[in-house]
Image (spheres, helix red, strand yellow):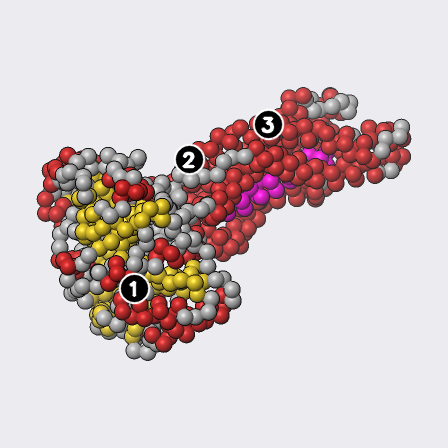
């Protein structure tokens, strides 16, 4: 009997090639996309879980708020003191580690013999790092690999890059021409699903900052390993009670600060902190993409369900004969559910192959290395079996019940087997499909508009045609000489330098005193050391006072910090936080983290961080000790020649340092990498959603025109034009699409309005977006059904009536 069912299923597939293709293609695309998205989501949720102690590791992040702040300021970096102090003071802490991003502001120039490269992934950490985190050692051991201040652990890729087949243990890498690091260990490459990515790991003891325990100047990433059974929230309360007692004076001034213990496994998706080591994910997007994966699968099942019930008339006689011959309902049900399983099996194979073939493209598109290896073999097999069962039941149960319920007498007499309920269900499913499609079209348009808005928004910094060079460690006199020589080139408008990227400033400071303001104060600010032409180079607008002068630069050249005379340019928010108008601030003296000086100018508020956050107080101040970025404003004319000239000058100053450049716009775009990737994924799968919906609509149009062959023939004989007949056939489907637009539009508005709340600066949702989405949906639906409608309208009416 099973063999017979298989034969019937195969013959039906061959007999109805168009609908068979639509059924299999729709299910295959739905299953393939489901597997792609599920693999992506699985990769996101497994971040950092490879660590043996993942459930006991917490990241220490810092929150603060002053009386002038509109919201809590949460940052991922901490001062140097928390880890060693918490280890000593709290018995719940088994161990801890401080991590500093050595290449956070510029790549490290690393040399071994004649091999010279710029490395962008170098961290330094306390020697407890490899005891807390689980990395697989190829050479050396986790216990003693970072015991010496000048020791370093490298990845297998770096070992191959510098040493080839040589044993790297004991070899020396020269870093920035000033440090010699001895290789004491080689580990396997850091997993892509770790938020702590590095190629070289040095010892924190190599830094001067390791000698002092400070509670200000936050630049470290701090992690604690808790003892088994410790409640992190309870420990967090104890820690904040302890640190609050250390800062009673600050509390009285209206400033509050606290620490948060963030579980390691939540860092990638759930963190709300700024200044992370790498762009974090967002659990909201996980929910969105998970919903898309399920919806695509459901839409594909709906296609199959709709097509099978729509072509039920063609199988009515078969069912009637079989029932008269004694077939029971459960036997018919088994046959049709078996046919659904057969189609699902073919679709599953096609979907798996499609996902496998698409992994390379999707990996590049999403920025993650994706493949079936992410799954455990047992998980993947279970998922495929589960997918087969679920899709078979979703797509096959109702059609099997519907077809097996036909009454044999009615079907053999040629009476209609279709019920009004079945027609209503089919129309409802079409409405659901296109409601989903319209929802995604609107969402994609709004997301695209927001990303475009971010690119075009006047952030108060002119990023256009600004070439950026990484110059960390370059002495000030050499920076100045290099800058002066570059300025002589054609196509160069201005040159300046800064500590880090002006579109993502991360330096945390405090204003402790202000002239004319009684008592101590504690205003958390962001500050950045800059070269005196910084304001002019980036087109920052001053609303009061003046820019830095040559005298301001010369006043901080004294190697004794205590003798330096500082000048500051603050933004409007800083003046407001202190209690001044911009005009009142000019000439006032402030104490910023033991740097005492005079306010030279007040700048209009400009965005120096992601547009997810509002503008906060920032201070610019000249200081020559360290610059990380050289900012070269160009005319934009003959950019290739301009960059070539800059490179030639660079080689004359640094013949042994590789020349690398990029544009400030690129740094700005990296702040919205998560949104860009999610928006891109949303666009692609919106197209897939529309494609699946159109497949179903096309299949229904095929059956609708077949059922109306006699009607169309009679109308043509009576004089109806092709246009009239196309309109007649299309009208019913377009009504359903219009209903879908009405249903989807308010829901899309609500969801995207919520999404936009995550941006402090956001585009308005315009009415034309909904009109455009509606127009696209109607055009797409009309084009989908027009082929069948035109084909029916052009058919010979005599032949149509004769065949009927």
Name the front one of labels 2 and 1.
Answer: 1
Q: Label 3, on which residue?
A: 742
SS at badge 2: loop
Q: Label 2, on which residue?
A: 757
Along the polypeptide, which appears first: circle 3 or circle 1?
A: 1
Looking at the picture, how far across and down is residue 576, in whole percent?
Answer: 29, 39
* Image quadrant occupied by the N terminus: top right
SS at badge 1: loop
- The quarter of the picture where residue 243 lies is top left
- Which residue sits at x=51%, y=55%? 361
Q: Is residue 326 above or below residue 562?
A: above
Looking at the picture, how far across and down is residue 524, in whole percent?
Answer: 24, 43
Along the polypeptide, which appears first: circle 2 or circle 1?
A: 1
Q: Is residue 770 magenta?
A: no
- From the viewer's side, name the closer residue of 283 and 306: 283
Disc number at residue 472?
1
Disc number at residue 356?
none
- Which residue sits at x=26%, y=36%? 68
Residue span colored magenta = 679-703
Cα gap from disc 3 to disc 1, whole angstroms: 57 Å
Cα gap from disc 2 to disc 1, whole angstroms: 37 Å
| Any part of residue 763 in sight | yes
Name the front one of labels 2 and 3.
Answer: 2
Cα gap from disc 2 to disc 3, whole angstroms: 24 Å
Q: Is residue 66 left or right of residue 347?
A: left
Question: Crowdedness of circle 3 by 10 Å Cα count: few (<14), some, many (20+)?
Answer: some
Is the C-beta separation of discs 2 and 3 under 8 Å?
no
Q: Is residue 160 above or below residue 442?
A: below
Question: Crowdedness of circle 1 by 10 Å Cα count: few (<14), some, many (20+)?
Answer: many
Looking at the picture, how far across and down is residue 92, in whole percent?
Answer: 14, 42
- From the viewer's side, name the closer residue of 523 and 586: 586
- From the viewer's side, name the closer residue of 600 and 395: 600
């Amino acid at each position: 009997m099973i063999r017979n069912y298989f034969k019937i299923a195969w013959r039906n597939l061959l007999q109805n090639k168009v609908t068979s293709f639509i059924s299999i293609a729709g299910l295959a695309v739905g299953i393939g996309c489901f597997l792609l998205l599920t693999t992506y989501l699985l990769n996101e949720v497994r971040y950092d879980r490879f660590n043996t102690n993942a459930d006991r590791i917490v990241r220490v992040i810092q929150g603060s708020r002053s009386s002038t702040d509109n919201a809590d300021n949460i940052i991922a970096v901490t001062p140097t003191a928390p880890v060693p102090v918490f280890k000593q003071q709290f018995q719940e802490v088994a161990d801890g580690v401080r991590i500093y991003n050595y290449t956070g502001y510029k790549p490290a120039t690393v040399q071994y013999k004649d091999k010279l490269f710029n490395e962008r992934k170098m961290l330094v950490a306390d020697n407890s790092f490899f005891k807390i985190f689980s990395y697989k050692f190829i050479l050396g051991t986790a216990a003693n690999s970072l015991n010496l201040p000048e020791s370093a652990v490298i990845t297998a890729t770096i070992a191959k890059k510098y040493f080839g087949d040589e044993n790297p243990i004991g070899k020396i890498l020269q870093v920035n021409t000033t440090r010699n690091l001895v290789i004491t260990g080689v580990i396997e490459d850091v997993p892509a699903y770790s938020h702590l990515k590095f190629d070289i790991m040095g010892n924190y003891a190599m830094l001067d900052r390791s000698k002092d325990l400070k509670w200000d100047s936050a630049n470290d990433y701090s992690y604690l390993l808790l003892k088994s059974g410790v409640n992190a929230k309870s420990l967090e309360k104890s820690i904040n009670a302890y640190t609050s007692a250390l800062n009673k004076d600050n509390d009285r001034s209206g400033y509050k600060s606290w620490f948060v213990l963030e579980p390691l496994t939540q860092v990638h998706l759930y963190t709300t902190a700024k200044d992370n080591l790498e762009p974090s994910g967002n659990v909201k997007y996980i929910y969105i993409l998970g919903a898309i994966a399920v919806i695509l699968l459901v839409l594909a099942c709906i296609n199959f369900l709709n097509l099978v019930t729509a072509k039920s008339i063609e199988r009515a006689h078969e069912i009637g004969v079989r029932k008269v011959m004694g077939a029971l309902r459960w036997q018919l049900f088994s046959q049709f559910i078996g046919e659904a399983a057969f189609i699902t099996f073919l679709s599953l194979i096609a979907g798996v192959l499609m996902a496998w073939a698409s992994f390379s493209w999707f990996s590049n598109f999403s920025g993650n290395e994706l493949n079936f290896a992410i799954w455990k073999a047992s998980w993947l097999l279970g998922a495929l079996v589960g997918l087969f069962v679920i899709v078979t039941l979703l797509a096959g149960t109702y059609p099997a019940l519907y077809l097996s319920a036909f009454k044999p007498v009615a079907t053999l007499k040629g009476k209609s087997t279709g019920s009004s309920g079945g027609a209503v269900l089919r129309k409802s499913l079409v409405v659901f499909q296109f409601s989903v499609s319209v929802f995604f079209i609107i969402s994609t348009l709004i997301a695209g508009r927001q990303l475009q808005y971010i690119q075009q928004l006047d952030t108060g910094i002119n990023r256009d045609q600004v070439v950026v060079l990484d110059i960390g460690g370059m002495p000030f006199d050499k920076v100045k000489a290099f800058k002066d020589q570059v300025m002589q080139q054609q196509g160069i408008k201005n040159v300046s330098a800064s500590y880090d990227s002006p579109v993502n400033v991360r330096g945390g400071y405090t204003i402790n005193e202000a002239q004319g303001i009684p008592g101590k104060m504690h205003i958390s600010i962001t500050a950045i050391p800059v070269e005196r032409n910084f304001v002019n180079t980036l087109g920052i607008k001053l609303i009061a006072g003046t820019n830095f002068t040559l005298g301001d630069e010369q006043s901080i050249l004294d190697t004794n910090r205590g003798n330096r005379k500082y000048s500051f340019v603050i933004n409007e928010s800083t003046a407001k936080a202190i209690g001044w108008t911009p005009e009142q601030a000019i000439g006032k003296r402030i104490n910023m983290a033991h740097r005492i000086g005079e306010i030279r100018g007040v700048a209009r508020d400009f965005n120096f961080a992601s547009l997810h956050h509002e503008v906060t107080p920032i201070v610019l101040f000249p200081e020559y000790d360290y610059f990380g970025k050289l900012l070269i404003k160009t005319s934009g004319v003959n950019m290739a020649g301009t960059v070539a000239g800059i490179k030639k000058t660079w080689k004359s100053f640094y013949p042994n340092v590789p020349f690398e450049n990029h544009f400030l716009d690129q740094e700005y775009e990296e702040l919205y990498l998560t949104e860009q990737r999610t928006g891109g994924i949303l666009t692609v799968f919106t197209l897939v959603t529309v494609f699946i919906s159109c497949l179903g609509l096309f299949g229904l149009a095929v059956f609708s025109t077949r059922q109306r062959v006699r009607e169309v023939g009679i109308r043509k004989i009576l004089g109806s034009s092709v246009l009239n007949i196309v309109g007649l056939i299309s009208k019913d489907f377009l009504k359903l699409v219009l209903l879908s637009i009405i249903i989807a539009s308010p829901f899309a508005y609500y969801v995207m309005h919520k999404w936009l709340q995550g941006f402090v600066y956001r585009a308005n949702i315009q009415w034309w977006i909904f009109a455009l989405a509606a127009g696209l949906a109607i055009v797409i639906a009309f084009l989908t059904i027009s082929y069948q409608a035109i084909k029916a309208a052009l058919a010979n009416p005599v032949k149509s009536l004769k065949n009927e």
